[in-house]
Image: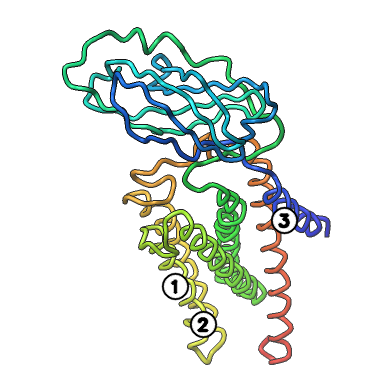
Amino acid sequence: MTWKYLAIALILYSLIVGMIVPLKSGIESVSPAFAKTGDTIQVRISGYNTIFTHPADAPTRVWFTFDEKHAVAGSDVKAINDRELEARFVLPTLLPNGKASTFLNVIVDHASAGTSLLPAGIEVRQQEGASGDMSAWQQHPVGNLHVQKGMSFPYQNVIYESIRNTYYHVPMWFALMFMFIASVWHSIQFLRTGNKQSDRKAVAYTEIGVLFGLLGLFTGMVWANYAWGAPWNNDIKQITTAIALLIYLSYFILRSSFEDNEKGARLGAVYNIFAFSSLIPLLYIVPRMFASLHPGATGNPAFGSQDLDNTMRMVFYPAIIGWTLLGFWIGQLRARYLRLFDKVAQID
């Protein structure tokens, strides 16, 4: 019984902490978004969860960076309000990569809000016929950066607060996988021993696995609507996930198509093994072979340290454990119900 209380505690923990912990400070946008080498520009930076005016005497530094060794520091940095900064930049006459244009990262370092980064925040184009050297890129290196204090989640410019869906969308797929593993195990046991209770457990865990799959698909569509502009984008992983769920839904249709319950159970168990063997390629292999909007696919890197840091892991892993334990709990209850139903129907 202890593990059932643990399941409830972990789910409540992930729901509450996952929602109330704030995101780190970040940079939403930089204006202007384009500039030319040799120009002197006045830049306005818009922040997220920033406190640029508190405290009033907190030093704020701003850089445009090409890499660790090449950076340009801003001057006359002034906080307009808590979310907006202004700074003046004198851009060197030559780009460090020798190309016609390049994107520079924008870094803001605030004594209280910590350090924020906007990758490829501004595009700088090389003026024709310009000359000079690279010394201007090395005069003000980035260093002595501050770290935001307190517990907070990573800020990502594309997904913002929806990063919290990591604690609900992703654990659904982990729980689904564990449910289907338990289901196929009991199907194999039923084929070996003929134990009817093993078949009931296979059915129960398949039902819970499909439920988690539908929840995972729904939370994914909510996330996609925010991050990608539409709930369904014909992304390869969305398509293969829908196919996998349809395969498992066919499992129930197959079982119910036989008047002989024993025959339906045995064919269902064989089909369940087939369904599980197709699950791994559909969810984890095929999506990685094609370009996808999902992390970890071709053209889109998997989660990195800034996407899933140690603070997020404090919520992410307990959420996986909690939802998985809840799935096994519901599966046990469902198997007991099926046994009572069979007794009433005089099947067993």
The amino acid type found where label 3 is placed reads Ile
Q: CA distance from mark 3 to mark 1?
A: 28 Å
Q: Name the one closer to the observer, 129 or 166.
A: 129
Look at the image and tell me in which quarter the C terminus lies: bottom right
Residue position for label 3: 11
Q: CA distance from mark 2 to mark 3?
A: 33 Å
Q: CA distance from mark 2 to mark 1?
A: 15 Å
Q: How far across and how far down the image is residue 328, in percent?
A: 68, 63
Q: Residue at x 62, y 36 (%)?
A: 82
Q: Is residue 243 above or below residue 88?
A: below
Residue position for label 1: 246
Kindly state the secondary structure of the residue where label 1 is placed. helix
Which image quarter: residue 47? top right
Q: Earlier in the sequence, mark 3 or mark 1?
A: 3
Q: Which mark is residue 255?
A: 2
Q: Tell me, yes or no, whether the two marked residues, 2 and 3, touch with CB atoms within 8 Å.
A: no
Q: How far across and how far down the image is residue 71, in percent?
A: 41, 17
Q: How far across and how far down the image is residue 292, in percent?
A: 36, 51
Q: Earlier in the sequence, mark 2 or mark 1?
A: 1
